[in-house]
Amino acid sequence: MATEEQVQLLQALAALSPKYADNDLFKYWVQKEHRCLDKWLHYFPIYEKWFKDFRDTDLVFVEIGVYNGGSMQMWKEYFGKKAKIIGIDIDERCKQFEEDQVTIEIGSQEDPEFWNAFKQKYPRVDILLDDGGHTMNQQIFTFQKMFPHIQDDGVYMCEDCHTSYWQGYGGGYRRPDSYIEFTKNLIDVINAFHSNGALPPNYFTMNMGGVHFYDSIVVVEKSNRYFPPIGHWFGPKVLEDR
């Protein structure tokens, strides 16, 4: 639980915006007793925007990066009794944070065999939150392996994407192999049908509902588009085409 000084500061911040004052995740972070939970303040409204519709459903939620287990407790309370929470970490000590509704899997997000076995064990994932090692290879590889495994109308979120600008994680401003630059390219991919053949549509073109950028977070919606974009007019024309 936060110290008295931290609570006072966070309450002052919450008073500035209803995005925090009315946010159950933020209130849990500040007010409830829980294990260590390390998050950036501005993440909480983003979580609420993308996760609120999954509350009180039987979703399968996966977070890469367990650390001290605090977020496992937060997601369990937020999503409700029907939810299954799965944490992934390379540190075997994280197994101690398993409890009712919470399972911890040990493995590396850079290991293709780990992901192959994981997908066999968990054929359904509704939300995946990558808060793992934060290196460029880890973030890109995990997206490539796991985005296709997300259920239709699910959410793929990668946080702490500021490491795309940090050399220690393999990033750097506009470095072409950073995660931010990789996901910028998804903007072209989602519009591939309009490229006049310059960029052939692929699996991601047909299964991304949107790509959304925030400070340090990228969200990709999983949504089967079923058919290429269709445009047509209905109703009488008033003005002649020009």
Image (cartoon, rainbow, N blue to C red):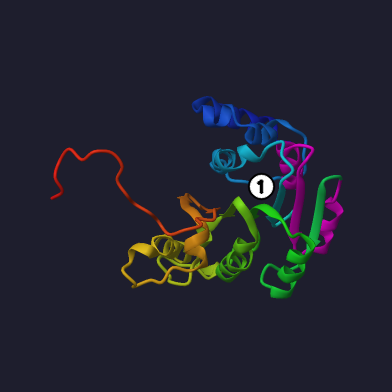
* Residue name at image x 77 percent, y 39 percent: 34
Which quadrant does the N terminus fall into?
Answer: top right
Residue 128 lies, in percent from the top left, at: 65, 54
Residue 196 lies, in percent from the top left, at: 31, 69
* Residue name at image x 47 percent, y 52 percent: 210
Camera-side residue: 125 or 218?
A: 125
Camera-side residue: 112 or 122?
A: 122
Neighbours of disc 1 within 10 Å: few (<14), some (14-19), many (20+): few
Camera-side residue: 85 or 10?
A: 85
Is residue 88 shown in magenta? yes
Q: Secondary structure at mark 1?
A: loop
* Residue name at image x 47 percent, y 51 percent: 212
Query: Is residue 65 shown left or right of residue 16?
Result: right
Residue 122, above or below 70: below
Going by the picture, which residue comes out furthest to the front? Answer: 236
Residue 133 lies, in percent from the top left, at: 64, 63
Query: Is residue 14 shown left or right of residue 4?
Result: left
Query: Exactly how many numbered labels are in the figure?
Result: 1
Going by the picture, which residue comes out furthest to the top? Answer: 15
* Residue name at image x 86 percent, y 45 percent: 100
Residue 227, above or below 28: below
Camera-side residue: 164 or 57?
A: 57
Visible residue check, residue 36: no
The residue beneath circle 1 is 38
Visible residue check, residue 77: yes
Image-quadrant location for residue 176: bottom left
Residue 173 lies, in percent from the top left, at: 41, 65
Query: Is residue 207 shown left or right of residue 66?
Result: left
Q: Which residues are magenta?
A: 70-99
